[in-house]
Image: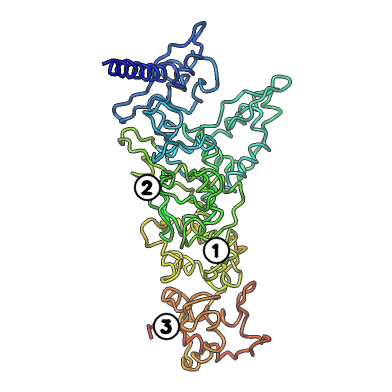
Amino acid sequence: MRANKHLLLWSSLGALALLLVAVAQEHVLKEWRRIQGAARSGTAGAEVHLRQIVIPALHVTDRCVSCHVGMAPGEEQAVAGSKVLAPHPNVGHDPAAFGCTVCHAGQGRATEKADAHGDAPHWPKPMIPRRFADAGCGSCHTHLQVPNLAQLRHGRTLFEQYDCLACHRLDGRGGTLRPAGGGMEGPDLSRLGAIGYRRDWYEDHLARRAKAAESAWATSFGAIPKDDRAALDVLLASRVGAPGLVEAKALFHSLGCRGCHRVGGVGGDDGPDLTRAGELDPGRLDFTHVPGEPTVANWLAEHFRAPAALVPGSKMPALGFGEEEIRLLTFYMFSLRRSGFPEAFWPRDRIRAERFGEREFATDGATLYGSFCAACHGPAGQGMRYPGMPAFPAIANPDFLGLVPDDFIAETVRRGRPGRRMPAWGEKEGGLRPGEVAEVVSYVRRLGGNVKPEADAKPRRWIQADAGDGARLFAAYCSTCHGKRGEGGEGPALNNKVLLTTASDTYLMETVRRGRRGTSMEGFANPSTVRPALAGTEMESIVSFLRTWEAGK
């Protein structure tokens, strides 16, 4: 009996102790309680209680504000203390209207730091790293008409050269007080692209300067050439309150990534669709070859350094990105996500993109070429080589541009090269529109120094020669580079119906005769150390042989 009483007594005391520990952990030792306990609201301590943002229409319940008290509705300016209590930066809308996790990801209902930030095992939506916080804008927004990075940086350089920072703030810089009352006369321009601005700003500024005898109008503002004003407009239209994100997207529009990847339904099909690449589940990633912590950010960065090392069989070559480019591309990848909010909550830019087909990229030739073509044909149209892949042709080569009219280039862009990695951009879903094709053609012509095509008075098909003799000559002198059946190798694939139906006999004949400067294709009109020169009739025979492939023989 005594033993049973002791057992009951000590087990009850143990259970009571466990309950007391549980009560202490839940009501005293919780991190969010300690943070709130140290907070000050006015002259007294802040009220300690569980805070949350609940938005039934969006199915959002976020308790992040239990620690980030200064971001809770109605308490933005009332709480003082550690950094975690700070109010939310101004993002152009009330964060409480949408909650926290729609922008930052993580686990909204959790109250422990690791769980709330999504670092808990098996949680598929970890919080976006703080250094890429602006990437969360991509959950709802689709920034439109973003140019390539060179255009964006040119506009920023001009903005500084013309001393616009004397009066205006832009992305946290500028608007500084100066002697004699100069400076800080104009509004902050950091969100101008989102809210709109006067297109006649230049004329308005000139008129104001004419009325101002002194101050910053007289000392800082002057005449701006038309081309520079256009470049400044490109910069101003891109300012949507997320500067790092826009720069990251502009870099993506400079590297030819859409040549292989789709984003928002537009782009190529060789690589995976990136529309929701920012929602990668870390539990599904292999971190074996990723140095450092096993995070999505580190995985993405290492993938840009060495794609095939992380994804066996990947067709993406190592492109030699610098660390700043890797940082910006990782930033952009995190922005590629989509909230499942009802359409009534969508911002205007997303509606314009998804319902009206407005482009996310600018549609000038430079940006279109950078978005779709630069990875394969080179930033300057010089052609590219990647290990294990056929060489990509130099489309800005003057010898090429001097032989082809714009229609030839446009038809190549529209119909592509079947069997090769060149898509039919004018025919495929998610490709280029007719006006965009024309812009690309014009830009390629500019890359080549605006070389004009030579006039050709001959008909498109004028060569009548011995195709059998051409087959022998092709095997002896051409197949090493172009393949035994014209399938391509070091040189382009010639057994391609789009090429052969588009190319005239003069184009083929002159290409064989002249060659291509800067490439391994030397003209056959002159001898080399490894072969003799070919007579005109022999070169015509080769062209006749190529035409047999056009007929499917």
Dot 3, how many residues are within 10 Å of its Cα: few (below 14), some (14-19), or many (20+)? Answer: some
Amino acid under label 3? Trp
Which of discs 2 and 3 lies nearer the camera? The answer is: 3
Residue 150 location (% of width, % of height): 60, 48
Q: Name the residue tied to disc 1.
A: 377
Tell which circle, 2 or 3, labels the residue nearer the N-terminal end.
Answer: 2
Q: Is residue 488 above or below residue 190?
A: below
Q: Residue at x 50, y 44 (%)?
A: 294
Q: Name the residue tied to disc 3.
A: 549
Tell which circle, 1 or 3, labels the residue nearer the N-terminal end.
Answer: 1
Q: Residue at x 67, y 85 (%)?
A: 528
Q: Nearer the viewer, residue 203 or 293?
A: 293
Tell which circle, 1 or 2, labels the residue nearer the N-terminal end.
Answer: 2
Q: Secondary structure at mark 3?
A: helix
Residue 235 location (% of width, % of height): 56, 40
Q: Is residue 487 above or below residue 65?
A: below
Q: Quadrant of the N terminus?
A: top left
Q: Name the residue tied to disc 2.
A: 357
Q: Nearer the viewer, residue 316 or 213?
A: 316
Amino acid under label 1? His
Q: Quadrant of the C terminus?
A: bottom left
Looking at the rendered structure, which numbered label has been put on residue 255? Answer: none
